Amino acid sequence: MSDVLEGVEIERLEPRGGIGAVLAHGRIGPFKFEALVYRERAGRGEWELRGGRVGMLKLKRAAGGETVFHWDKRLVVKATTAQAGEAADLLAAGLAEHIFQE
């Protein structure tokens, strides 16, 4: 695993073959996440979370289930805490490379 994603646990990957992506479920710190991660770059870069081939990312508190960040080709829910923002940044920076072993 890349150093960027140390401590990230991928629990399940669901291939989305028709679109060249996977839906990843996992944990990072005190959060659970669901992310739609693409093998290739989006045709429209503004759809990617910080340029990281993540088209959708939802972060929720593992305890309680409160949504603390949500991106779906655009910002839906702004990070509610600095820790949630940092987790989103880490996932955007390295999740695609980790999942597709690049």
Image (cartoon, rainbow, N blue to C red):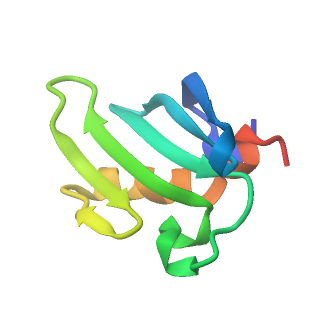
Q: Is residue 36 left or right of residue 83?
A: right
Quick one: which residue is furthest to the right in this view? 102
Residue 55 rendering spot, x and y as whole percentages: 50, 59
Of the 4 image quadrants, the one containing the N terminus is top right
Residue 85 rendering spot, x and y as whole percentages: 35, 59
Residue 77 rendering spot, x and y as whole percentages: 21, 60
As drawn, 70 above or below 78: above
Quick one: which residue is furthest to the front in this view? 18
Q: Is residue 96 left or right of residue 82?
A: right
Q: Is residue 80 left or right of residue 71?
A: left
Q: Nearer the viewer, residue 1 or 98?
A: 98
As drawn, 86 above or below 30: below
Q: Is residue 24 left or right of residue 85?
A: right
Q: Nearer the viewer, residue 16 or 46?
A: 16
Q: Nearer the viewer, residue 73 or 98?
A: 73
Residue 11 rendering spot, x and y as whole percentages: 54, 20
Residue 39 visible from this viewpoint: yes
Q: Nearer the viewer, residue 90 or 40?
A: 40
Residue 2 visible from this viewpoint: no
Which residue is rendered at x = 40% and y = 36% of the image?
Answer: 33
Question: Residue 72 falls in which quadrant of the image?
Answer: bottom left
Question: Residue 62 falls in which quadrant of the image?
Answer: top left
Question: Residue 66 falls in which quadrant of the image?
Answer: top left
Which residue is rendered at x = 31% and y = 51% of the image?
Answer: 84
Which residue is rendered at x = 54% and y = 34% of the image?
Answer: 24
As drawn, 29 above or below 47: above
